[in-house]
Amino acid sequence: MLLDFILRRLIRTGRLTVHAADGTVRHYGPDAAPAAGMALRSPAAARRLGRNPALALGELYMEGALEPVDCSLYALLELLVANVWSEETSTLERLLTQSRTLHRQLAQFNPARRARRNVAHHYDLDGRLFSLFLDRDRQYSCAYWRTGEETLEAAQAAKKRHIAAKLKLDRPGLEVLDIGSGWGGMALTLARDWGARVTGITLSEEQLAYSRARAEAEGLADRVRFELMDYRTWRRPVDRVVSVGMFEHVGLPDYRRFFRQVRETLTPDGVALIHAIGRSSGPGLTNAWVLKYIFPGSYCPALSEVLPAIEQSGLWATDIEILRLHYAITLREWRRRFAANRDTIQALYDERFCRMWEFYLALCELAFRRSDHMNWQIQLTREREALPLTRDWMVEAERARERAGPGSA
């Protein structure tokens, strides 16, 4: 059986127990711990998993054809991910990735119409869903944790301070373009706490309506506006550009265009801050299940794929920071909140949807905790003299804002 062949070679750490539909129980791996088990409800499920494990594992769990046994879904995935990212298998994965370069380029071809459709697939879901597992500000990106023990709300507020400080908003009235503005939290914070005038652009109609309503309700509509707009159509210079959690949807073929657009948008003394998910082990592939069910057209790039596009744009990369475990902790909190509100979410959608999102949140947490994913923040300028000689000013601005508290611009 193909699945048996794969698992005998894959599981080199821990112990995986597989319960087949005919009652057969097989054990894989040399060690008693960590241990996990799964039950396959039909011979067809075993065949599907053997033929295409990256796609079928999540699909079978969504359908109820695969169930964890004597462990949680997270524990089962953790054992599998740890073995996939062992030295032997990660080398094989890199070789397979290199052989699929052309496929990666085609899969990430992302013209405006396709980009809009991809965004709608995920971000135009019922807004109540996101309110049930995100923080109150609906920050749907990596939080910033000093200890990992803060509340999610505190860590997301710290993320916004951290990013805002890097933008050097050192005087009121600076104009900011927020590319991929989500539910408006970053744009509203920059206006309220830092005195900026902000335009947020998004391709999600749900996010657009929610953000505009927030700006009106918070009395900030005179300083913050939101538009349904592709970044490629922006034509007016601004003092600052910020983009948080959007670059993953740009697509490899458009990296040069994205950074040229940032350069052309910035005033000569302007500053940009791009925050995105990346990978530390070089170019890779988006998981097939994630690509099909969660984020079509998405890709989390290695810095080796990003920096050449920055260099060719003529921008200066003035600061690069790597956040290693911050998103793992963020996803852990999202998983906990999703589980606590599962009955309500099931009433909004159905059991299959809940299983899909449980699998998504667990798999993504493990991508940061057990494989090669991380977050990077790159600060960019057009001119080498645009910022002070050292980084001290960023830390000082961040601490000053934390002491002042929100709403004191």
Image (cartoon, rainbow, N blue to C red):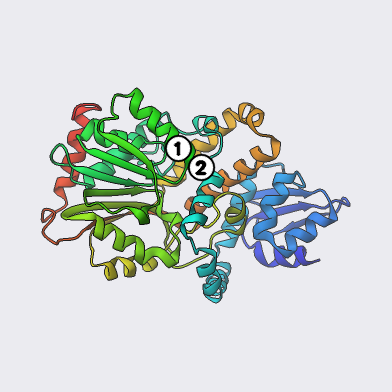
In the rendered image, residue 130, in percent from the top left (x then y), is placed at 51, 34
Mark 2 and mark 1: Cα distance apart in space: 7 Å
Taking the view exactly as shown, the residue that stands out farthest to the right is 22
Q: Is residue 376 visible?
A: no
Q: Residues within 10 Å of mark 2 (few under 14, many from 20)?
A: some
In the rendered image, residue 276, in percent from the top left (x then y), is placed at 39, 53
Q: Which mark is residue 389?
A: none
Q: In which quadrant is the N terminus drawn?
A: bottom right
Question: Mark 2 near mark 1, Cβ–Cβ under 8 Å?
Answer: yes
In the rendered image, residue 249, in percent from the top left (x then y), is placed at 46, 55
15 lies above or below 329: below
Instruction: Kindly indicate the quadrant of the structure image that contains residue 357.
Output: top right
Q: Amino acid at mark 2?
A: Tyr
Q: Which residue is mark 1?
A: 207
232 lies above or below 208: below
Query: Quick check: 131 left or right of 241?
Result: right
Q: Residue at x 77, y 67 (%)?
A: 2
* Label located before the other in sequence (2 or 1): 2
Q: Residue at x 45, y 37 (%)?
A: 207
395 lies above or below 12: above
Towards the viewer: 203 or 328? 203
Q: Is residue 347 visible?
A: yes
Q: Which residue is mark 2?
A: 123
